[in-house]
Structures are given as structure tokens and as C-alpha cells.
Image (cartoon, rainbow, N blue to C red):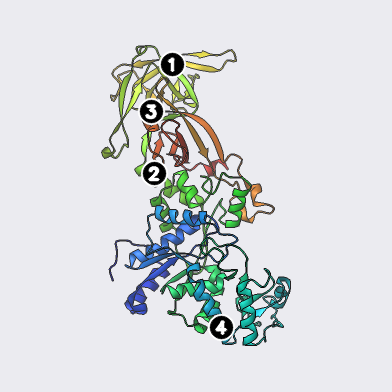
Amino acid sequence: MTVSDTKLPSSFITQIVQDDIAGNVHGGKVITRFPPEPNGYLHIGHARSIWLNFGIAEMFGGECNLRFDDTNPEKEEQEYVDAIKADVLWLGYKWAGEVRYASDYFDKFYEWALHLIKAGKAYVCHLSAEQASEYRGWATKPGKESPYRQRTVEENLELFEKMRVGAFAEGECVLRVKIDMASPNMNLRDPILYRIRKASHHQTGDKWCIYPSYDFAHGQEDAIESVTHSICTLEFRDHRPLYDWFIENLPVPSRPRQYEMGRLNLSYTVTSKRKLKLLVDEKIVDGWDDPRMPTISGMRRRGYTPSSLRKFCEMVPVSDKNNSDVDLAILERAVRDDLNENAARAMCVMNPLKVTITNFPEGETEVMKAACHPNKPEMGERELPFTRELYIERDDFNEDSSLSRKKFKRLVLGEWVRLRSAYIIQANDVVKDDQGEIVEIIASLVPGTVGEDAPEGVRPRGVIHWVSASQCVEAQVRLYDRLFVNEAPDRVEGEFSDQINPESLKVVKGYLEPGAAQADPETHFQFEREGYFVTDRHDHSPESPVFNMTIGLKETWASKN
């Protein structure tokens, strides 16, 4: 077996795979799978599962299948299938062979259902949903057998055929398997194998009006595909005895083994597909890929990178005992570290204050040079037009000359500041409107200070960013914050939607250095002294620039809250 350069952090799963290879279990093969249900977009928890399943396969020279568990046509859509495939590819992974679907195996599942009926191990049950719940009992109370449990094989075959051809209404009956109505494991109390659903399927059309349950299909899919290491989250641990029962009682071609790991719970986040869909349907967010959403497509649109998500996954231990409750700040740190290393620099002013340089010729432009990245000369340089009239951030000026240099390291009336990659300037005067608000700074530049130290007697307070007032480009800038104000929105009494952060999105006008506006969609920048931003993958164009804020330069949420 060829082992790749991919190295996942050591965990109980990597150890199991190593031991299996050493013991020639499964003939030394490693086959994993990523099996999403196409009933919504993937979220950060799925990203971790993708990283682990595909990473295990890469690390040990194996294969990872992409398989859609599409057993519920009423909640599934082709849109979700397409989005999931795009997410996997964007994260940098490639599945083995063709995309697989549970629906590819519907004929085989039907044969195996007949096998169980003929073996006297499955029966058609006409209990209503309410009756079935009552018969099932409780965790501390044994269930009781359905009055239909003793039907003959011939009767069950006839009734199941009627189910298949649509002779019964939805909910009128189901096919169940005989196991043990007194089992302490509720999953073994005669679980459902097939339900009637008269709904068109996105892959099989109207061929079927009965559909296998997730529990019946899931383990058998693994067996058909000869999956060697079936990795699930801890809530499926109680389902494993059921999967094993099916494997033991059906003529499956292989015997997969399931392993459970703790799931990822991220603070200030919900990952329930039902709740995420509610956010979309109630238009609390602008679609599944809204940059505030914890979906992979939302994080991509916000400017998170595949490498930052993979790095985050490496930072969260894989446990076989406990779920991982992770602070969102850890994910943000992974994103920030990646962008600091790789994002080009640019300047953008979002709350402009005009500066007029009185000793710079009117109508002239001087082109300044600035590094695209301070530590990566290979990224080249960018050109910055410098003109008589500039914009700086309003917060970067204060007319109170008594402010100490320690407390305010920006422009003060009567003192100097350096403009990033340009001249040192001095604020000489201000112009105010009728309400007393400053609308313009009258300033002068110190000649010969581009790229040079300040001359004797000139002490700049600090460095600020700027753009040319006449040659900047106006852009829409979307400022994002956390979607929820509560650290655990799922655990708060009342509707989780009541925890929405009203400040999670602000849209402002930005004044941008002209070169950055020409960038392609999904280009990352550090707006100097502001944060990390990305050109929107759908809405951005050089003619109408749109930038999404990815994350600030440093963690600020804790101090704000």
C-alpha cells in the first residue's frame, strides 16, 4: 500500500487503521466514505467529517467514496446534491470513482427486504404512528408486540407487493423487522424497514413509492461498497447493534465495521439542518451561502479558505468518548493566521474625511509603490495614485492637540503622521460645516519622506491608511459579525432565532485603492488596519466591486461582550 504525504493528527481512528493494515485486516485495504443526506447544505461539522474520511484515505493510500444517503425524497433536492459536491471539491478532495447514491441500491434493498420476509424476520404492520409509539414502550418500559407481527410469510409478501405498487396510502402501513420488543436498546424494537412515500425522487423519479429507512439502508450501503472503516458520530453508537443485526441476517458481500467519534459543537453557532433551513426560509439570512451561516458555502463566501478549515480540523482532537465543544475563536484564529500569511494588502477608507495637501500641485498625480505583501516579495508591488486631495478614516484624526502620543497614534492638529507607503503629512487647519463638524483637513506634506526616515524635528505619531479622493474606486463593503449573540443559542429557552445578533450585517460604502477593484471574485485582501476581506464570489465585478469582511485583524468579540 502506498502511503501519501498526508498526515492527520494521531487519534484512536488513525491507530485503528494502522493496526488493521499491520494485521492485514480487509486485505490491507482502506475504504472510507462521506455519506451526507442531500436535505440541506453542508456545515462546519461536515467539513470535519470530510477532512477525516478523505484524510484517512489519503494518509493510508486508500479510497474515499462520496455517497448520498437519499432515502427521503420529500426533503431532498438536486440543489443540495450539487452544492455538496462543490463543497467537497472546494475543500480540496476528490472522491473515488463516480458519485454514489443510496438510490443506486434500491433494487438490492428491495431484494433484501424480501429475503427477510421469506426468512420470517420481517412483517407488514398496520399500526398507526400513534399506536406504534405506544407499542414501542419507553427506555425503562418494555414494548409489546404488534398484533400484525405473526402474519404468515405469504401474507407479508402479498402486502409488501401492494405497498410497492401503491395500493396503500401513505402512513397506512410499514414494513418492520422482527428483533426484540423488550430490548433495552430502543433501536432494536422492531424498527421500520420501509415506508410509503408517494413522492418523486430526484434520482429515480417515480419508480418507487416505498423507500427504505435510513437505518436499513446505511449499513448495507457500506457493505455493498466494501467500506472498511465506517466513521460516524457518537449519536449513532446505539444504532450499531441494529446495523450489525442486518449484516448478520442478510447475504451482504462484506462486513463493514462502524466507529464513532465525538461531533463538533461550535460556540455562537447552530448546525442543525432544520434550524439552518428555518433561518433561510424565514429570510433571517440571505440563503444557505449567506456569509453569516456556518455552512461550508457560507464560510467560502465570507472568505474562509480551504486550508484554514483543514487547519482548524487539525486543531480539534478526535475523541471516541466525548463531543468537542469548541470556541468559535479557535476557528477564527485559524482563518486569521492563514489570511495573514497569504492575503494581499490593500487600502480602503470606509468613513472618509477629506484631506487637502496644500503644497502638492493641483491636478497632478504621483504614483507610489507599495508591496502587495510585506513578507512576500514574490507577490510583487502595487501602484497607489497620490493626489492633492485624499481620504483618510475620520477616526484617524483628532483636533485635540493635547492628546498624548501613547493614547492616540494618529493625526492630530499641528502634528505629523505618515501615510502608508507615501509622505509624512502635517495637519495645519480644519474646515467645519454649519453644525461644527469637521469636513476637511488642511495639511502639508514633508518633501522627501516617501520611503525615507523623518527629518530632524519631525516626529510622526504613527502610520495611517489613505486613498486618493479623485482616483479611488467606490465599493460596497459588507461588514459581518457573529450571527448569534448567545454562546449556546441551541440551549437558550425560547426560540433560538431570538438570539440573532442585530449587528451581524452592516453595509457601508468603501473608497478603495483602484487596483484592488480589478481583482477576480474570491480574491482575498487585508485592508490595512481594518481586517481581512474577500471579493464576493457572486456579486463582485470590477465595474461594481463588492467586498465581504472575513474577519478582523484581532479578536474583538470578547472585549465587546
Spatial CA span between label 3 and label 1: 30 Å
Q: In which image quadrant can residue 89 be found?
A: bottom left
- Few, some or many residues within 10 Å of mark 3 (<14, 14–19, 20+): many
Query: Marks 3 and 2: CB-CB under 8 Å?
Result: no
Provide the residue designation for mark 4. 116
Between 122 and 178, the one lying in front of the other is 122
Q: Is label 3 in a helix, a strand or a loop?
A: helix
Indicate which disc, 4 or 2, sits on the residue closer to the N terminus: 4
Spatial CA span between label 2 and label 1: 37 Å
Residue type beneath disc 2: Leu
Spatial CA span between label 3 and label 2: 21 Å
Between 484 and 512, the one lying in front of the other is 512
Between 410 and 165, the one lying in front of the other is 165
Q: Given this view, does label 3 or label 1 mark the residue nearer the observer?
A: 3
Spatial CA span between label 4 and label 3: 70 Å
- Few, some or many residues within 10 Å of mark 4 (<14, 14–19, 20+): some
Residue type beneath disc 3: Pro
Residue type beneath disc 1: Gly
Q: Find residue 314 and report its horizontal and vertical position in percent.
A: 41, 58
- Few, some or many residues within 10 Å of mark 1 (<14, 14–19, 20+): few
Q: Is label 1 in a helix, a strand or a loop?
A: loop
Provide the residue designation for mark 3. 514
Residue type beneath disc 4: Leu
Indicate which disc, 3 or 1, sits on the residue closer to the N terminus: 1
- Look at the picture and state if 466 lies above or below 327: above
Indicate which disc, 2 or 1, sits on the residue closer to the N terminus: 2
Spatial CA span between label 1 and label 4: 90 Å
Provide the residue designation for mark 1. 414
Spatial CA span between label 4 and label 2: 56 Å
Provide the residue designation for mark 2. 339
Q: Given this view, does label 1 or label 4 mark the residue nearer the observer?
A: 4
Which residue sits furthest left?
378
